[in-house]
Image: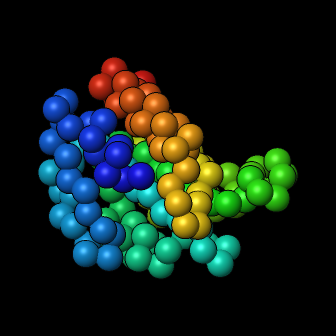
Amino acid sequence: MAKLMGEVASGKHDVLIADAKDMPDISSCDLVIVGTPIYYEKPLPCIREFIDKNEMEGKKVALFLMSIADKFGKKSVKYTENRYAGLTKDGIKGDVIAIRVFHGWMLKEDKKTMEEGKEWMKRVLDAFENGKG
């Protein structure tokens, strides 16, 4: 998903796609997109470590989560949005301009989710570029 979102942004912006566990230097970034799958009821530990280390103060931040909660009904999706987005967002001192939970997959990429990711990224960029975030 991150690579696809990077493709949407490239050509308009400098893009750095990195694994959080590599602790990339984001000091020159104005917009940071953070994505994580939800495993065992929480975001990946490396995402928490990345957020705790960087804080992202003064930056625009967009978060996306990948989850299979929709398989368990609408209440599960709402729970995921409230609980896990909150856990991921906690500690970010930047301006969180967008949060989205996407349908995850186990073995094969979900084409519908990939298209939704592209469209979400376009909206995030629009909000960033036009100061709506």
Name of the residue lying farthest toward the front: 108
Residue placed at 58% from the left, 60% from the top?
105
Residue at image point 36% right, 53% down: 2
Q: How many marks?
A: 0
Residue 133 seen in render:
no
Provide residue 109's location: percent of width, then percent of height. 50, 55
Q: Quadrant of residue 25?
A: bottom left
Name the foreground residue: 127 vs 58.
127
Camera-nearest residue between 97 and 119: 119
Foreground residue among 24 and 74: 74
Image vertical order of residue 48 relative to residue 14, above or below: below
Residue 71 position in % (x across, y down): 77, 57
Q: Identify the residue at the far top of this view.
A: 130
Q: Is residue 106 visible?
A: yes
Residue under the point 27% across and 41% down: 7
Residue 61 left/right relative to 112: left
Q: How is the image coloured?
A: rainbow
Quadrant of residue 84 in the image? bottom right
Q: Looking at the rendering, in which quadrant would you find the C terminus? A: top left
Residue 46 against residue 130 in the figure, above or below = below
| x, y percent for residue 63 | 47, 50
